[in-house]
Image (tube, rainbow, N blue to C red):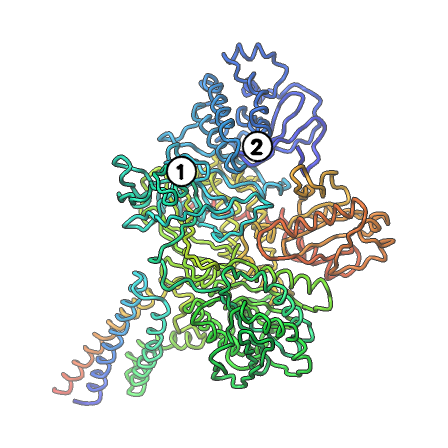
Amino acid sequence: MSQGIMLPQGWEARWDPQSNAYIYVEQSTGRSQWEVPTQPSYGSAPEPSTAPTQSHRPGRRQYPTAQIQQVYGGGGYDSQPQQPQVAPGYADQQQPQYFTPGFGGADAQQPAYGQHQQQQQAPAYGGQPQVYGQQQQLYSGQQQQQPVDQMSNQFQQMNMGYQAGGQQGPGGKRLHQIQTVNLIGMQPDVTGLDSPPPPYLLPDNASVTGSPNVQPDPSYQRCTLTSMPTTQSLLNKSKLPLALVMSPYRSFRENQEGDEPVPVIEDSVIARCRRCRAYINPFVTFIEGGNRWKCCMCGLSNEVPQLFDWNQQENKPADRWSRKELNHSVVEFIAPTEYMVRPPQPPVYAFVIDVSQQAIQSGMVAVAARTILESLDNIPNADNRTKVAIIAVSTSLHFFSLPAGATEASMLVVSDLTDVFLPKPVDLLVNLTESRPALESLLGKLSDMFQDSHSVGNALGSALQAAHQLIGKIGGKIIALTATLPTLGEGALKARDDPKLLGTSKESSLLNAASSFYKTFAIECSKQQVAVDMFLFSTSYTDVATLSCLPRYTAGQTYLYPGFNASRSEDAIKFATEFGKVLAMPMGLEAVIRVRATRGIRMSAFHGNFFIRSTDLLALPVVPTDQNYVIELQLEDDIKGAFVVLQTAILHTTCYGERRIRVITQAMPTTDSISELYASADQVAVATYLTNKAVERSMSHSLDDARNLITNKLGEMLSVYKNQVTSSSGGASAQLAVPDNLKLLPLLCCGLVKHVGLREGGSIPPDLRSYAQALLTTLPCQSLIPFIHPRFYSLHNMSNESGNPNEKGIIQLPLTLNLTSEKLERHGLFLIEDGQNIFLWVGHEAVPRLIQDVFDLPNYQELKGGKSTLPNLDNPFSQRVNNIINKIRESRRGVYKPHLYIVKSDAEPALRSWALSLLIEDRMDHMSSYAQYLTTVKNKVSRVRILNLFESES
Amino acid sequence: MGGEGWLFLFAVLMAAVLLFTMVFFIIMFSDLECDYINPIDLCNKLNQFVLPEMIAHAFLTLCFLLSGQWLAFLLNAPLVGYNVNKIMAKNHMYDATEIFRTLSGHKKESFIKLGFYLVSFFYYLYRMILALISESD
């Protein structure tokens, strides 16, 4: 199997899905180990220390089959080679499950494994053929499933296998396998970043239908722990965070990821618990012959609605067990009128466009007007109800009257900025379809209208108020585009970016809002169901920190285009693409999100872009697709049941005039063991949680505190792990023990403390920092992880498949490399991308042929660095590189279209150091390298340990 | 009744008013927790009382200073300092967007103030009676 590290001869790396790690197998002997091998294999005899485990190694081929049968009393291993026929691709992943990997010297720190070994040796073998039998059944029955489900089912089944083998917790629960790895001196395996979270090991009969879709895809909702601690004191003791990470309004991309559409329940039979108002879900139980159902959260027995078993379309009885809400974790109900405060409102867009001199000169107005014009067909307008208004703002407000049927728009100017009023009661907010001719003619000449204006100054605050007055009665979205700092009227701001503050503890004041206007106005907007999106085009300081308050509390999004200049086609294309996608994005209007959970669990804190309307109700005037929310959980009471259920409900009006409720149900097993908690932690979710906490801390305290928070949290977790889970005794050891499922968390934390949003140092403009922070708190995991830990590919020596489509037509990406400049070669071509920017690194000894093939230039000297577009040339290599870049741009959810920068390894020091700053495993300026960071964490671990020793002795 | 008596009578009344303000604050905060009121209304309501409360307390302290009641003045001075510091940092008003994050802190602060006003209420009462007795002697 492929692997970033070159293996010595005779070794093979195999992916072990259960522990999310590579296992290294010596091909000649079948000997296996977790450590990366250093010595080539010469087919030597296995080491004596591993002798006890040899007896049940499937890979060991020198044993005659007959002998194995004799020893194990059944064709257990004999049947194994047949596995690939049943489930191709999974067979070699399973193998590590059934033999104990060699412990070449690592026995001391792997006590969990030691136990294993003993338990497995004696009674297990009788049970194993049976286990395989079960698996075969499973596979043949469920070939159609999603890979992830298949995977998790496989895990569950395997753990059943372990039960037979004696790995059984108290009470017969299935347990995660815990695997300790040492990080010091190891290069992190970055391919593991995309691996799925640990499986949810639910009891067999947890769901009523046994459908494979009862758990949500991690892209909808995931939890930092995949098993729930039974008490708060256990959670506190473990120091692990407990939080839900979700993007419930995730985009749906059929053609690429094989996303399944959300099943819709159209008969408006909505069964809810009378007491806790939970929606019926796969984890309820039916009692009294199916006439009543027992709520899985509060235990109340409720009546099953009369029409629950009735097919209303065909007017005949229906099969209850095929109902979508009992088979799917993510469903959408069409809500009847009881769920409406008012009839579904139409989608409304109000554009507030800055037309000051600077905005016109940068070309922003022209590009924006053209993009709106081109997107008029893509704006959600299914039933011709969509309304649009345009306000241009400079030193005064310019309204446009667009009467239905007219072909020309007339402009009305209001110069009173303190007491904003609308110059006309009608025709300012118009129906998109009816007033389209006037709108088109206006957009066509908007930029030219203000071409000669020399007004410097921007009354954005007043314009926003006007837009709010205009659409406040209906609600909708204000899209504000501004190229200058608002300096006039309400909410005027000053350039406060004092370079002396940067890098000091006072820097966090620059990350907070300068004026309270934007906060109070945001509350006003949220109340009237108005969301604000901010598009900022700064050439100088625009106070992103203050302006981003509006999107933050109204569930919008901030977009920043630093140094925007439309005469550079890359800038114009990037903005036009992203803006077009924002306009075409389906909106959920007037939404509220509420999370319900099994009794005893309380939502204690919320992070993300929304307004918290009451203790557990999040108000979002407009739900954008692909935005991330983090919700912290607390345990108020001890939890009794074998599993808990968490349910997110998002009530919204679609832009097609339907009131809908999207319900996401997730069940988690409970546990009272600390090692099980560690084995079930999800590193991606934990990293997302830490990101949100750190950004919050950087605003309330300081950036220093935020970075310390990350490192301290990590240190605490690992020290608890070391003391409570591994049995390593005494003193500071040279190793840093982490559970295998968290082994990339230190790397992500290291990336986080070095991220632009939190990085130490006085050279980062506050605008960029604020914007990075806004992204850190809103990007869904899929984009957030690359944003923290960029992807790094080597293009000049990529394998033949990379950049070409595979059988399914999906472009293959090359192997991801570790983020260190060691990998950079002087003659190479490399690509670094973090989802927002793509850097194409060209080594200065690159052969002219490479430059010719990719850039169509004779040699390296002719090449120019900077923002660029790659030519699409008629040679295979150029096409592959272009394929890869396009694939990267498309592969993630969200509207962002990353810029492509060409970086020459010996020119443009600023660009070069920017690209190098993404290589987070390296030391940079005074920020520590990954290895140094690990040492810091390790020292924290030993220090906490010493403190604990003191406590226990006193 | 002499000046000291009148001063402490006034102080007793003021302390009672401040006491009730704090009780009102605490009731409103628990209403918010129980979802009887939304954060926007809560903040609009409470923010009306924040400055008057601080000014009333500062005025009382000023009276003690001018009349030379050193002990009573020193008792109140730290709270005045705390309030002034909050106003300078511009975080004396309740912020509806942050209220749920800071709610526990606000409640704690209100309880401490409540206790303080209660103690000072009895202290003023005691001083008032003391002043009346010494006059009648």
Q: In terms of secondary structure, where does tag 2 sit?
A: strand
Along the line of sight, which residue is nearer the eye, A515 or A951?
Answer: A515
Of A33 and A96, nearer the camera is A96
Query: Would you name the residue on which mark 2 appears?
Result: A16
Q: Earlier in the sequence, mark 2 or mark 1?
A: 2
Is the same chain shared between marks 2 and 1?
yes
Q: Position of residue A647 (x, y in %)?
A: 39, 48
Q: In this view, does A192 lie above or below A142?
A: below
In the displayed structure, would residue B71 be above or below residue A216?
A: below
- C-alpha separation, residue under disc 2 versus residue under disc 1: 35 Å
**Amino acid type shown at disc 2:** Asp
Image quarter hosting the N terminus of chain A: top right
Is the C terminus of chain A in the top left, top right, bottom left or bottom right quadrant? Answer: top left
Residue that badge 1 annotates: A322
Q: Which residue is drawn at 51% across and 69% down?
A: A431
Q: Where is residue A789 in the image (x, y as percent from the top left)?
A: 61, 50
Q: Nearer the viewer, mark 2 or mark 1?
A: 1
Residue situated in front as seen by the camera: A812 or A905: A812
